[in-house]
Amino acid sequence: MALKIVKGSIDRMFDKNLQDLVRGIRNHKEDEAKYISTCIDEIKQELKQDNIAVKANAVCKLTYLQMLGYDVSWAAFNIVEVMSSSKFTFKRIGYLAASQCFHEGTDVIMLTTNQIRKDLSSPNQYDTGVALTGLSCFVTPDLARDLANDIMTLMSHTKPYIRKKAVLIMYKVFLKYPESLRPAFPRLKEKLEDPDPGVQSAAVNVICELARRNPKNYLSLAPLFFKLMTSSTNNWVLIKIIKLFGALTPLEPRLGKKLIEPLTNLIHSTSAMSLLYECVNTVIAVLISLSSGMPNHSASIQLCVQKLRILIEDSDQNLKYLGLLAMSKILKTHPKSVQSHKDLILQCLDDKDESIRLRALDLLYGMVSKKNLMEIVKKLMLHVDKAEGTTYRDELLTKIIDICSQSNYQYITNFEWYISILVELTRLEGTRHGHLIASQMLDVAIRVKAIRGFAVAQMATLLDNAHLLTGNTQRNGICEVLYAAAWICGEFSEHLEDPMQTLEAMLRPKVATLPGHIQAVYVQNAAKLFATVLQKHEGETDSQAAQETSQLLIDRLPLFVQSANLEVQERASCILQLVKYIQKLQQKNVEVAEEVTALFAGELNPVAPKAQKKVPIPEGLDLDAWINEPPSESESEDEKPKAVFAKEEPKHYRSRNTEVDEKELARRREVRKQEQANNPFYIKASPSSQKVYDAPGVEHIPVVQIDLSVPLKVPGMPMSDQYLKLEEERQQKEKAERKKKEKKKKREKRGKGRKADSGPESEEDITPAQHVDIVTEEMPENALPSDDDDKDPNDPHRALDIDLDKPLADSEKLPVRTHRPEVLKSPAEDRVSESVPPETKKKSSKEKKEKKKDKEKDRKRSKEEKKKKKKHKEVEEELLESQPEEPVQSEETKEAAAPPTSTSAEEVTVPSSAVETSSAAVPESEPDEPKDTEPEDTKSSKHKKKKQKKEKEEKEKKKKKRHHHHHHHGEAGGEDSVQNGTVEEEEPLPPMSNYSVLAENSFIKMMREDAEQVYDIQGNHQDESKVVVSIIFENKSDSFLKSMEFNVLDSLNSKLQRPEGAGPHDGLTVPFQLPPGVSNEARFVFSVQSIVMPQKLKGTLTFIVKSDESSTHEKLDFKLHFTCTSYLITTPCYSDAYAKLLESGDLKGSSLRLEGINMPFHHLLARICFHHHFSVVERIDSCASMYSRSIQGHHVCLLVKTSDQTVSIDAKCDEPSLLGNVLDELKQTFSKC
Amino acid sequence: MIKAILIFNNHGKPRMSKFYEHYTEDTEQQIIRETFHLVSKRDENVCNFLEGGLLIGGSENKLIYRHYATLYFVFCVDSSESELGILDLIQVFVETLDKCFENVCELDLIFHLDKVHNILAEMVMGGMVLETNMSEIITQVEAQGKMEKSEAGIAGAPARAVSAVKNMNLPEMPKNINIGDISIKVPNLPSFK
């Protein structure tokens, strides 16, 4: 054996290790890709070897290559192999590789469940640690469900190192398996007060992360956090808690009031900038949540702003940045306090650091007023010119638009100026925000009627100079502007100076190079222009010119008819035909202009973006109700109740419906009319219907007279700067005028101002330069004011929105390992006997007491808060008080028919679980109810004996399902469809259990795997001679069992592994004691020399039975039987590899015929898979090839055929005696049934 | 939550990447490239925060980075992390590397990627900060190192010998490394605590 290891490591010397690989890559700078591909080939070879060290080395190299961007998912299975090594060195390599490249789509992850579970319960804390770290990166919903309970047990591990990791990973488990949150939460909460600061910090971390997403569920923890905040000295923890409070205060203003004082103290006392900063942030959050106008809080605001100013003025750029960031939060609620620092912020605009400039930009948003908007935008435009990188320039662009358009263009006094700014912005090359500018242009042109003439002129110029915009860069986003320009020119063509020229510009051949959607708009609006031109010419009775225009279209449109874009093509060919027809009419001297114009008559009103969503559901409309009778689900079932309902229900509905009809119809008609009136796409009967426009905020706004001091026409490209001057002049003039007027009378109101016009205008009344009729976007009648439509439905955290204050129901449990139903309590749990979680164990009276204690603790805690938060506390207490009285409602309403004893469930459960334990070993009856058997958590057994049978059946089913799962794992890859298919189509598999009684007396029962296959022997690839046997000990007596010693008489071939220094005949101490009724699992390691023969070992278990008065020594003899198949490991094998193996000729054959087998083929296969650890390679009809490997690397191949009741098995193996024994065991398995 | 931790050098070559959300290898490389692009064009004396890591997560996320000698250490985090706290965490990370490798330099990271990952695993787990106390981190890393050594035992000796010989046989090795043998100088920053 030792020789083998040395030989292995000698082999290894000549493999490349990670360092060699890196060195090689660095030496092949020119042909790196080629070198790496040869390396990958080498790695593939190495992965085929049996030596785990070689494999681990290969996987380690793959991890490096993965970082360089090579896909290594093909090696996923090898990674799993390395993960399951017993050596920490290799295990760590495996888990690292897995954490780098596994994800939810990796199918071999299913294979890891048991391995991870084993590692989690490893006695070596670093095995556990490595498994937890790895799992945190690739946990899937399945893994989370299967391992949640194991991880929760680890949260109470003795080592803080494990505890903190287990606590942290729970967050990931919650995300993937939200059902685990409620059962696990009490323990998580406990960890907030863990003696180890690391664990505490981890718990705070997890709860903060949870609370950030769903803060309202965590309000009840506020007192606890408050205590932590005032007691903790760990800055990390403090920061997290303070951040958490920031999320909680908006929900509970009283909390905020309480917080201000300690936070202010911290601000004054701490020297850590990070803490100071977070404190300021939370104080801001508190102040935002509190209703303003509280005099004593202005001091806090001042303190914050003052501290932030210090940060911003600091030379450290990081502090400056954060200061600005926090300042922008204050801005939202207390703009005045920020506005006084305008100088500082404008100064930051010139900072060399882009991040800081961006933050300052954010602040500018709140700094503008009617008075300074132009000035600030001018400054920004200067920056735009200077900005080098496109990202910053784009950011500037969006900010300019944001600032100008905020709250319905509140601060814009002169829209001509704004249009000019927009037009100036179109000169930016390569910006991504062309569409943004375009939508602004459209918005302004549509909503500000007075500006249309000016806008149209500008847009016409833009169209004329389109070549400047499109340039030669193809991916130029700015050409989007042309979309707006074309539409505006078309829609408002009556304002055009020279529509003919614009029409000509829109039909230039160059247009065909624009993106399709823009071309489509061009074509459509060319038609609108055409209509205008026609009307003009006919008005002047210039039929010659009109006909020329038609000809122009007929000449140019064919270009678009050939467009590859469907939209363009369709519109162009429609319009082309139309124009041709018009031309015909023109030639007959028919006046067509009016009819053509009618095509485009009517005005489009803007519709609010959320309008559709906000249409309220009309009264009496139930969207969830069936329109027709629902199709009956199954005709065979529930015949009776259906008959009952069929008589009553329809009558009921009908009568109600008619009622609705009478009353509602009239009302609905009215509503519909109104809707139509408001619908821009619905042609109105007469303008009078407009009057229905009475929704609040949709009123037409009083009109301000046009100020003639502003020239309405600006030739050529506009320069926004001139407006600044004009504006100043205008304002001065106005001021002077006003002064004059004020002398005469009271100030004359020149404009009532728009609705939103209440803000900074008061500081100095500035009147808009022109009539600004901002048409408000349309909203449906009775629009719902709700704003909850912003939540992302895909957010994984939505699932975690769970009320944690409700008492746990019995049905809420973490799933325990269901394929071992005998062990109701997971063995690991008993090790932490003190703090048994109420959700995994049935509630016992003892626990009830504990709970009460907790309650009292809670109460004490809340007493501390009493003075200030009395009301809150009362609610809390009430909640707690009501806990025991509340009847625990089961989720299963089907089972709700249970006797009303359910409240006394606690007493009942203990005996019932015992009954289950003993009876579960007889798993034959096959339940035929069609309930779905999702492998969810074990059902509570609270419905007493009546329900027990049913439950047992269910459990069996679940167990069976698990086995499916199991096989499925074993077959990895190609074959799963076969197995999955059988579940649905063929008769379900009979249940198979892994464990059965090994030996038993009145005190103790030793469980082992079921009759056919004896021990849970898990071979390890690496240490080829080691075999692990797990045995469950169950205490059947009423006494306490302790000092258990397990001993086996070694044979030459098989030896029990004993700790160093122990003699060959010494027993092994079982590492736990058993209270009455408890069972636990222990594992024993055997070293086995040869595996070709089955083995039998005699053994004894000695233990002390301790009852109240006496203690006696007892012993129990047993025989351990190692079958040959128990040395086989389910190993997946792909069919090509399998074929190669058979071709190689190294294998010797043998065969077996079984008569009178009366079971479906897939049952047969499942049995072989389950009991003999084979996996199906390929299955064709009634013929299947199977594969397995022994722990010493022997290949065993089977070809199983069945016809009638005869099964023939041809087997091949490289070790004839092993093969013979395996076949014997196979025979034995089937002779029993 | 920390979304990703990247280490790359002044030329954008990745030296370690740890993503706490799944991306395909191609996307990962693209993220690294883009991040490098963003970070590398920044001056030395600007702030260490950066928005616009659009590939990871979206606008809520920030890049927080530090530049040491030839290496950039970049953390991509969301709003639940304290910016200054993460800056300190990077410092702790680098100091820990410095202790574990004894005057860490880029080459150490290149040749011992696994070790770097193992150290990081003691600090950050699944995107959440696990431990910030340097001595605790080093204790755990060393304990695990010891375990590996004891496992290698006699069987590992020949392999170690060969690897030593291999290193001796390659006198040209330093020649190929024109960058990176400058050790990362860990400046003493004002302590976080």
Image (cartoon, coloured by chain):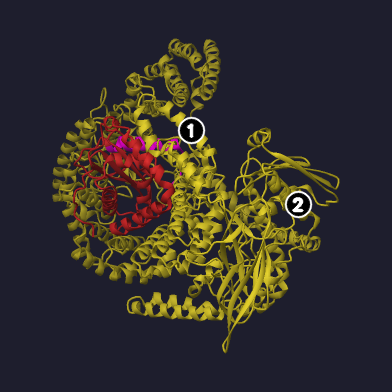
Chain colours: A yellow, B red
Q: Residue at x 20, y 41 (%)?
A: A349
Task: Name the residue furthest bottom.
Answer: A1109
Q: In which quarter of the image is residue A374?
A: top left
Q: Which chain carries label 2?
A: A
Judge the density around disc 1: few (<14), some (14-19), many (≥20) Cα neighbours within 10 Å.
some
Magenta span: chief secondary structure: helix
Q: Where is residue A1193 in the image (x, y as percent from the top left)?
A: 60, 45
Counting residues from the start of the chain, the first of labels 1 and 2 encountered is 1
**Label number found at residue A413:** none
Q: Quadrant of residue A898?
A: bottom right
- Pointer 1 residue: A42
Query: Could you tell me the amino acid type at mark 2?
Result: Asp
Judge the density around disc 2: few (<14), some (14-19), many (≥20) Cα neighbours within 10 Å.
few
| Magenta-tinted stretch | B20-39
Q: Which chain carries label 1?
A: A
Q: Nearer the viewer, mark 1 or mark 2?
A: 2
Examine the rendered structure and indicate whether residue A701 appears above or below residue A456: below
User: Does A117 appear in magenta?
Assistant: no
Could you say which is closer to the camera, residue A22 or residue A105? A22
User: Does B23 appear in magenta?
Assistant: yes
**Label number found at residue A1224:** 2
Could you say which is closer to the camera, residue A1123 or residue A631? A1123
- Horizontal side of A489 relative to A828 (left or right) equals left
Secondary element under disc 2, as helix, strand or loop, is helix
